[in-house]
Amino acid sequence: MTKLLGASMMVIVAILGLVFAVGFLVLLKLHLPMGITMALTGGFAVAIVILQYCLGPMVIDMIVKVRWASPEELGYGTGQWLSTACSTFKISEPKIGIIEEAAPNAFTYGHGAYDARVVVTRGLIEMLSPDELRAVVAHELGHIRNRDFVIMTMVQALVLLLWTLYVTSRSSSRNNWYIVIAAYAAYWASYYASLLLSRIREYMADYSSAQITGNPNHLSYALVKIAYGLAKTQTVGGATVPVYAPPQINGPIAPPPPNASPYSYDKATSDRLAAQLEAARYDNAHAIAAKAIPAPPVANDAAKKKAKESPAFSAAQLGAFGVMGVSSMRAAVAWSGADGLANPDTFTTAARWELFNPWGRIGEVFSTHPLTALRIKALQKLNKLFNQPDAFDFSKIKPAKYKAFGRDLALVSMPWVGMLIGIAAAGSAYKNESRFDLSGIFMPLVGFSAGRLIVLLFSYMGEFKPSKVIRLLGEVEVSHVNPIPSALEGTFTGRISPGIAWASDFIIQDDSGFMACLFRRPLEIMKFWFGLTSADRYVGRRVRVYGWYRRLNAPYLEVHHFEVLDTGEKVYSNYFPWAVAGNILLLVIFAAGIVMLHGRPT
């Protein structure tokens, strides 16, 4: 039923898009006066955005598997804390939802402050300390207080309106080319301005979190754990164990068999132990993420002493991964100190790429979220207002220089350079023959496809070599077109988009941390079908993933293929060979067009 509802809502959204497209074309073909056409198309665009705004929360409610819960499920005393925080912000208390998945995620949605929802995942609850979790919730409350999701809806309506004005002006008159150029420039300026506004609202929500908690460091630590994944992990028997959602406690728990390993509880028992731990984890207001599940009963004092010296495995000790409202990062490395806090020295390693690789700042321009390192810098400036010490020392970060930036720029410009060469060739042919040759239409397309083929070939080079997540995260010499071919061995602990039935991208955890694995397919429909029908059965499996480690807004491993270790099954993405074949096919078609149409005038 959930898949049916999700598919139904996707159909509704697709129909809305078709209604807008067809309705817009109809208005253009009516050949109404310019003023009336612009008024109607603008009003139509705004109406579509308003309709999406009205339906948006319902779509999320139906697609995402959210269980609405009491705030106390986030920890003892959270209900009273939430009431006080909302009273301070003068907003209604939002509904609290929990997604029972390991990927740590948090987001806010709704029509306004009066019906807002704050949703967190089990992975987030398990990863963060009580103070950090409340800092994240306070960040989401900041979004509600600032009404910024309503503001963003209005901004998106204006951006869409500018686009409709551009298309209308382009089709209305061939003599007003300067108006067309101005409208097109205004559209793109408004688009990037909307992204800038989105980044500003994240800073504002960060400030709101600091106001409520009185300590900006709580959100700083949470950001480090989520954005870079610097949280504690636990390895059992040489294998990293994924996080499972604890169910309700029902009855007593029987001990494991005699002489069994401390980790011999079955999954149901372990889950119930985790639930017991969850009920008591906030007894200490400053407890941290290392929350050990009690070891099995032991028979003598020596065994008790040994168990005390060696903390038992806890699902709560695991780090996890996800994309959340406070972070746009799509990867994580799980590591922390003995106290459960993100290690400042490891943070300085993880932050180097953002601070010294120019692609970090370039990628931020195209992102809805600021770079994590810059957000932490901003939070540390707030420490002075709240008389708090800085959690991280940026002066310890060793400077670096990305030497391949020139090569990257040359590579990404190849398709456009090829197009310009094609345009120049077509212009030269026109000049020599004093008439326009139809084959000139295909010359820029040949140049663009040839440039794209070069980008593909240079972006997927190299031999896959074994590596670790934490080793890759510390690399500065990497970009989205300058990858590091790598092989990671670990466990698929979940999928990137929690609660989404058709999510097809995975999270891999090795003994050093977590990373996003993007499973691209030749066609989006193939990616959707794989996520809907197959991806879930690989969660929790030990795998060896071969792919290209890349980084732009966030680090990730683009999967070539992965191997399930216990069965030997190999699953290929097939994106790269099909992309190359597709570009070669386009080159052949465009070249054939040049040959066939050469000498034919318009």
Image (cartoon, helix red, strand yellow):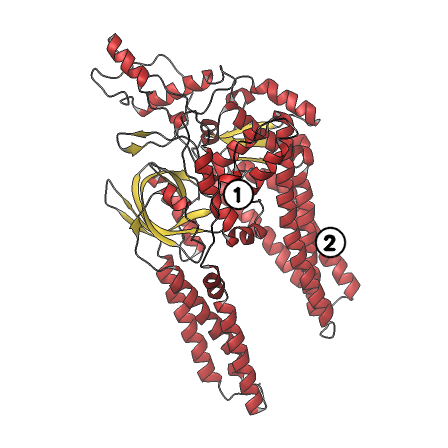
Q: Quadrant of residue 234?
A: top left
Residue sitting nearer the eye, 543 or 391 = 391
* Residue 438: x %, y % from top left: 53, 83
Q: CA distance from mark 2 to mark 1?
A: 33 Å
* Residue 455: x %, y % from top left: 43, 64
Q: Which residue is painted at 33% across and 31% down in the image?
A: 241
Circle 2 residue: 43
Q: Secondary structure at mark 2?
A: helix
Q: Which residue is painted at 46% across and 65% down in the image?
A: 411
Residue sitting nearer the eye, 145 or 58 = 145
Q: Secondary structure at mark 1?
A: loop
Q: Residue furthest left?
A: 259
- Residue 329 lies left or right of residue 45; in this view the side is left
Residue 85 vertical position relative to residue 62 in the rendered view, above or below:
above
* Residue 80: x %, y % from top left: 60, 18
Disc sitting over residue 185 in the figure: none
- Residue 110 lies left or right of residue 169; in this view the side is left
Answer with mark 2 or mark 1, whichever residue precedes in sequence: 2
Q: Which residue is painted at 54% across and 80% down in the image?
A: 424
Q: Which residue is painted at 45% across and 58% down in the image?
A: 403
* Residue 566: x %, y % from top left: 24, 40
Q: Quadrant of residue 116?
A: top right
Q: Can residue 573 be seen? A: yes
- Residue 199 lies left or right of residue 322; in this view the side is right
Tell me the mark number nearer the camera, choosing from 2 and 1. Answer: 1
Circle 1 residue: 328
